[in-house]
Image: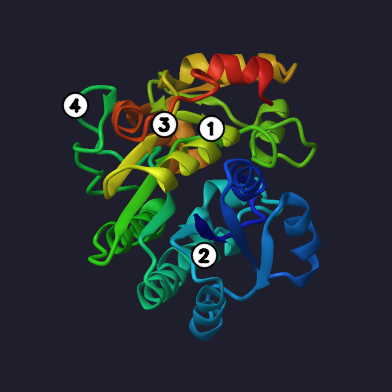
Amino acid sequence: MKIFLAGATGAIGRTLVPELVARGHDVVGMTRSASKQDLLLNLGAHPVVADALDPEAVMRAVASAEPEVIVHQLTALSGPMSLRDARHPDRSLAATMTNRLRTQATDHLVAAGRAVGARRVVAQSFGAFRYARMGGPVLTEADPLEPDPPAALRAVQAGYQYLETAVTTIDWGAGLALRFGGFYGPETGLSLAPDAVMATAIRKRRLPIIGDGGGVWSHLHIHDAAAATVAAIERGAPGVYNIVDDEPVAVREWLPAVASALDAKPPRRVPRWLGRMAAGEMATVMMTEVRGASNAKAKRELGWQPRYATWRQGLAHGL
């Protein structure tokens, strides 16, 4: 198939392009930076330079490619981030730009897809920390999203919802939104790279366990995110899909294991009231109340299986 991949040089894109090429697909990779054209050529894609926030540029790029499938992996989160950015995504320039990519750029890609007669749109969304804080510890796509997220997450969550609605309601093709879990592995915030923001925070003991550490997190290796995207390109009905590993886990169990994998000291533990004062409501909720996600639908309908079935395997072999 002819595939137009927006965000082709991001963490997922760099793994996704070679996998698609190996499966016989013809990939046109869009990048905003002309300097990254050689990277895309080396990965096996045909590069095209365009600003995703320029509707006319996107239309020209998509029209030239004439794709059957449009894949939306656009973010502005690939560069260095500070710990302040991680605590306050609503104030982060990178997150603000990414929100524009989830809203405005989504509209541009969908409009271009309609114009050229594409048959399918697959877009990157996010599932971790979004489900309502009620019911069991592990929820499905049929369960409600959190109606009242912490203030620092409201704009971010609204951006995800906008993208999912815009993609899954197209009436001229199949639109799939993939709700990824928290990424780890190469080119992510949790890797062995010296500037990986979460790994750095854990090594410096700046990411404590707040309260009982009962918040349940769902994780995903970056290579498994790419593999799930391949599956969604090739099959699956319109809708949202949780793309996470097989073992959602409480922070109190996961965080010490990550510290050990990074040869760091165990995380500190702080009471909930102190965590709220020091790190804010968002971090406190994430540490104590959030729910994990089930991947049963993606396995059943996309035929996808994570290479790293649990975060335990990923920590041992995938960082």
Sequence-wise first label, 4 or 2: 2
Q: CA distance from mark 4 to mark 2?
A: 31 Å
The mark closer to the camera, 1 or 4, is 1
Rendering coords of residue 84 (x, y %): 61, 50
Q: Amino acid at mark 3?
A: Trp
Q: Amino acid at mark 1?
A: Asp
Sequence-wise first label, 1 or 2: 2
Pointers 1 and 2 in contact (C-beta within 8 Å): no
Residue sitting nearer the eye, 291 or 83: 291
In the image, residue 147 sits, relative to residue 246, either above or below, namely below
In the image, residue 212 sits, relative to residue 275, either above or below, namely above
The mark closer to the camera, 3 or 1, is 1
Q: Secondary structure at mark 4?
A: loop
In the image, residue 225 sits, relative to residue 27, either above or below, namely above
> What residue sits 19% from the left and 26% below the top?
135
Q: CA distance from mark 3 to mark 4?
A: 24 Å
Q: CA distance from mark 1 to mark 2?
A: 26 Å
The residue that disc 4 covers is 135
The residue that disc 2 covers is 96
> What residue sits 34% from the left and 30% below the top?
293
The residue that disc 1 covers is 224
Sequence-wise first label, 1 or 4: 4
Q: Amino acid at mark 4?
A: Gly
